[in-house]
Image: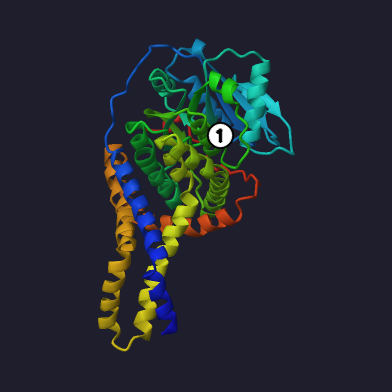
Amino acid sequence: MIRFQLIFSLMNSIPYKVFNGILFALSIYLLMLSIFGIFKRKPEKISDIKHRFLILSCAHDEELVITDLINSVFKLDYDKNLYKLFIVADNCTDDTESRARSIGANVLVRNNNLLVGKGYALEWAFKKLDDMNEDYDAVVIVDADNLLHRNFLKEMNESLNEGFDVVQCFADSKNPYDSYMTAWYSISAWMQNRIFQLSRYNLHLSNQLTGFGFAMKKEILKRIGWRTTSLVEDLEFTCKLVLNNYKVGYSHNAIIYDEKPITMKDSVAQRKRWMQGFADVCVRNFPKLIKKGFREFDLKAIDCAIYIAQPFTLTLFGINYLLHILSKIIYFLTSRESLLNLVSFDMNITRTSSVVSIGTLLIAFMQIIYPIIIMILDKKLSIKSLWYYLFYSLYMITWFPIVIQGIINRNSKVWLHTKHFRKINIDNIND
């Protein structure tokens, strides 16, 4: 009974009510933000330039997939004189370099076992390209396992002509039905393209870079440099852009296909790396973004701060919900008139912390209803996608221990390479 009284007192305390109020406000914000991803606003074109692109990919032991990436680049529907591909063979121990060269790609070889990771490789590549006096207007960053839709550069060019200095594309999946895990990843990616990316584009906020499929003008590198070395260099650079008053654009029509991990083991390793990087970047940039946001009334900075705080907000939501459920269980087990008193207790708690239930329902709505709506809007709904979606909640549950591990190990900088198991050609993807 003492344990129950302690929990009851906690859930009726002013600090707990304030805490719940913050989580409730955050739930409303995310829900309202996501609604703006339902539609597409008309682009505001301000120029009609045909930009020169340099497509850059850092590849570490990617011999299985590198030729498929290169072939998709060569098949782009864009003036061949206006783009060039460079592959960075980064600390490779396989045939990545020779295979890339054999089909006509420009290859830069990097060997550095001390500074390991994509961020370091990109920093090295940008300096190398600058020394080579390569002539281009914008650089496009892609991963070795990506495939580019034939209209990719056309659409990215259109977005740059809207006045953006940096543009993120629609990140799709090239193997959505290889396993339950790839299907869940794909559903999650389709959701993020709408509720995180398209919504921010429609609201004129700054979008988030996803690590691949984004273009940035060469002048950006000259002004602020790259210098991102965390496990999530894309997120770190996003924060850097916002802090320097740049806004990331988004193109829902420029599509790139990414390979998703097939097994739970590979998925956990990848997501743990993401969350370690997220937590690290958040700790270092959240205070600066919040300070800038409120001092300059910059909604882009505040929104970016909310986005990078995901590991911590997800943890708080989870703890709050579990505490609410635990209080019910304890009271049920310690009460004589269990069922009646549980109802009475629940009414008391609801009056003091109803935001727990409301916030949870809002999040549940976003996770349960939105995927169906989004798959319909983006023409992804099928018997297969619907079947895998029935078990999508299992995927969401696996995030909580991964998020906690990521926060705990946020200072780790160990880069884990994601293995690839199959080849997929751009001609095999139906769009």
Q: Quadrant of residue 231?
A: top right
SS type, badge 1? loop
**Total marks drawn?**
1
Residue at image point 38% right, 36% down = 197
Residue 61: percent from the left, percent from the top? Answer: 64, 37
Q: Quadrant of residue 247?
A: top left
- Compared with 184, 302 (above or below) is above
Tell me if I can see residue 68 in this picture: no
Residue 391: percent from the left, percent from the top? Answer: 36, 57
Q: Which residue is mark 1?
A: 65
Tell me if I can see residue 362 in this picture: yes
Q: Is residue 121 left or right of residue 173?
A: right
- Compared with 118, 26 (above or below) is below
Bin the neighbour count of mark 1 within 10 Å (Cα to Cα): few under 14, some 14-19, many 20 and up. many
Residue 343: percent from the left, percent from the top? Answer: 26, 77
Quarter of the picture containing the C terminus is: top left
